[in-house]
Image: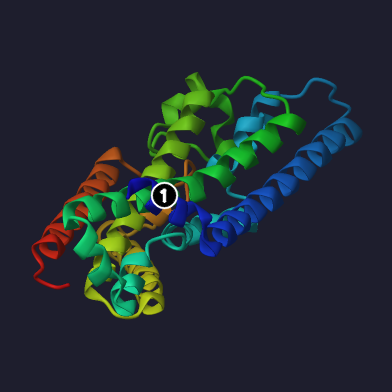
Amino acid sequence: MLATEIRKAFGNTWFIVATLFGCLLALISATGNIILYHETMRQILEWWGIIAPNLSASSCFRFFITSDYIQPSTDLFYALVPLLAALPYGWSLCSEKRRGYLNNVFVKSKRGRYFFAKAFAAATSGFAVVVLPLLLNCLICACFIPAYSTDIATVFNTGIYDSIMASSLYYSCPVLFVGFYIVLTGLFGAAWAVFALFLGGYAYDSVRLIAGLFVCLYLFGALDYKIGILLTGSGTEYVSLSPLIWLRGVAINGHTDIAAVLVWLSCLTMISIVLALRLRKGDVL
């Protein structure tokens, strides 16, 4: 059962489409930053004649998609992370319920075993579909931009202030900083995909399900921003609860904190478990 669900999750068209689109955005972001880096180095040498400028501000870690704030493709990728994560398999339970496939499955297998296999497949595909583009981007950037040592003196160039979650890692061990945000994005993608999966057990239209969740998350982000401004009088002084903000390792809107991450991941996990238990008892299906 588990092997079958994994094959279905990683072998369907939507996983391939979502992964390729994510990789395309990551590739465009990397290309733009590689061009920007080499153009900046050329201008420094040509305009000021500086042979050895402060290279910390031009480290490849600064241009990785995890800490980039310049390329539009980076913004688009992170804006679409929830959609990309749910596309591979988050819709499958809703679709199989509508087609009557579940009735045949439950005759041959226990519900608990089926739901576990379903959740595992959704989580791994949701994790992979957002992590693979991030790894591709970092690999390409590292091939063309040197990994200069990072320095806190370049904070105004990087936009990675102390209000950014795990910012100290960027200036002490940037590899861990990049790894932290890649894993964080993957975990959110996995949790979001499983949440969409089990919520689909209560829905009848998979398109509306995925699109509706995506819109709701965006509305939450807008509300979070407005409330932050209302409470602090600034768009940068509040702690952002929106995943669209704390998934990025650079200053966008507000502060980011690990507490918000833990709350989101815990809530998504607990809600998914409750939904799955109800479905297992046959209250809905």
Q: Check the image and report above or below for 188 versus 203.
A: above
Between 271 and 114, the one lying in front of the other is 114
Between 95 and 216, the one lying in front of the other is 95
**Side of 95 relative to 178 (left or right):** left
**Residue 193 x/y as whole percent:** 36, 57
Residue at the extreme front: 108
**Residue 32 x/y as whole percent:** 74, 49
- The quadrant in which residue 213 appears is bottom left
For badge 1, the amino acid type reads Ile
The coloring applied to the image is: rainbow
* Residue at the spot 34% in from the left edge and 47% down from the top edge: 2
**Side of 33 relative to 259 (left or right):** right
- The quadrant in which residue 166 appears is top left
- Quadrant into which the C terminus falls: bottom left
Between 20 and 221, the one lying in front of the other is 20
Between 170 and 201, the one lying in front of the other is 201
* Residue at the spot 23% in from the left edge and 59% down from the top edge: 108
* Residue at the spot 89% in from the left edge and 27% down from the top edge: 49
For the question of whether residue 71 can be seen, the reply is no
**Side of 277 relative to 71 (left or right):** left
Mark 1 Cα shell of 10 Å, populated few (<14), some (14-19), many (≥20): many
* Label 1 secondary element: helix
**Residue 139 x/y as whole percent:** 66, 34
* Residue at the spot 49% in from the left edge and 52% down from the top edge: 10
**Residue 224 x/y as whole percent:** 31, 62
- Reading the image, the residue beneath label 1 is 6
